[in-house]
Image: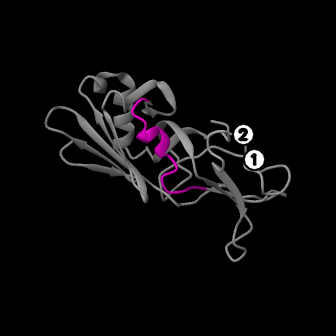
């Protein structure tokens, strides 16, 4: 690979030491449509508030992995191994992963690089959970969409614990290259924060 390859907001570049560098960016404040609604269901949208992933990113003792398809059996890089460099700013969480020559020998990494170069990797999907209420009073909020924009329920995440980021083929967040998990609105009204989250 002579120069950088760009794919859905991701960039893969060869380095002189035999490694490859993978860069990605997750802008905050962008909404994804998780459910378009219909058949009696209201649409559901979701967004991350600025710095909502900072807890694990800023904690030197917490590891965060970069994986292929949410499989811890298919690692690409990690924060503790110093092969995953994260920068959390109010506008976006960015990362650079160093794919070392050794990890490039793994079969899943060869498969990932082939899929990336073929244009089959669509973006990033984070694995996380919402911060518990005893730690963060308002970790999330569900509100009504502006009626001039639609009638969706909007889930805003203010504090989440990030465990891993995975490279996926079909992201829900087209602007952010992210694919979030499904969620269910509260049973009564919109005042209580959601307590359940399925990874």
Q: Residues within 10 Å of mark 2 (few under 14, many from 20)?
A: few
Q: Secondary structure at mark 2?
A: loop
For this rendering, which residue is in front, 119 or 33?
33
Task: Give the farthest residue toward the bottom.
Answer: 148
Instruction: Indicate the quadrant containing the C terminus: top left, top right, bottom left or bottom right.
Output: top right
Q: What is the image's colouring?
A: one colour
Question: Whole-percent x and y of residue 166?
Answer: 47, 37
Examine the structure image and report whether residue 55 is included in the region drawn in magenta: yes
The residue at the point 43 percent across, 44 percent down is 120
Say left or right for 42 vs 118. right
Instruction: Identify the mark nearer the N-term, 1 or 2.
Output: 1
Quarter of the image for residue 136 reads top right
For this rendering, which residue is in front, 157 or 132?
132
Which span is picked out in magenta? 47-61
Residue bearing mark 2: 196
Circles 1 and 2, Cβ within 8 Å, touching? The answer is yes
The residue at the point 52 percent across, 61 percent down is 29
The residue at the point 30 percent across, 25 percent down is 103
For this rendering, which residue is in front, 133 or 160?
133
Residue 121 appears in view = yes
Residue bearing mark 1: 184
Instruction: Indicate the quadrant containing the N terminus: top left, top right, bottom left or bottom right.
Output: top left
Say left or right for 176 vs 106. right
Q: Residues within 10 Å of mark 1 (few under 14, many from 20)?
A: few
């Amino acid at each position: 690979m002579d120069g950088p390859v760009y794919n859905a907001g991701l960039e893969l570049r060869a380095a002189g030491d035999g490694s490859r560098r993978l860069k990605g960016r997750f802008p905050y404040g962008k909404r994804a449509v998780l459910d378009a609604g219909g058949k009696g269901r209201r649409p559901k949208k979701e967004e991350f508030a600025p710095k909502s992933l900072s807890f694990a990113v800023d904690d030197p003792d917490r590891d965060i992995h970069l994986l292929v398809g949410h499989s811890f059996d298919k690692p690409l890089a990690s924060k503790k191994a110093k092969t995953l460099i994260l920068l959390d700013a109010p506008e976006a969480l960015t990362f650079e992963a160093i794919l070392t020559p050794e990890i490039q020998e793994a079969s899943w990494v060869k498969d990932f690089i082939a899929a990336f170069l073929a244009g089959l990797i669509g973006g990033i999907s984070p694995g996380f959970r919402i911060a518990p209420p005893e730690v963060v009073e308002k970790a999330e909020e569900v509100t009504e969409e502006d009626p001039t924009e639609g009638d969706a329920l909007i889930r805003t995440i203010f504090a989440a614990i990030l465990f891993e980021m995975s490279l996926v083929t079909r992201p829900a967040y087209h602007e952010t290259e992210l694919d979030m998990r499904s969620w269910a609105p509260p049973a009564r009204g919109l005042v209580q924060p959601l307590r359940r989250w399925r990874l």
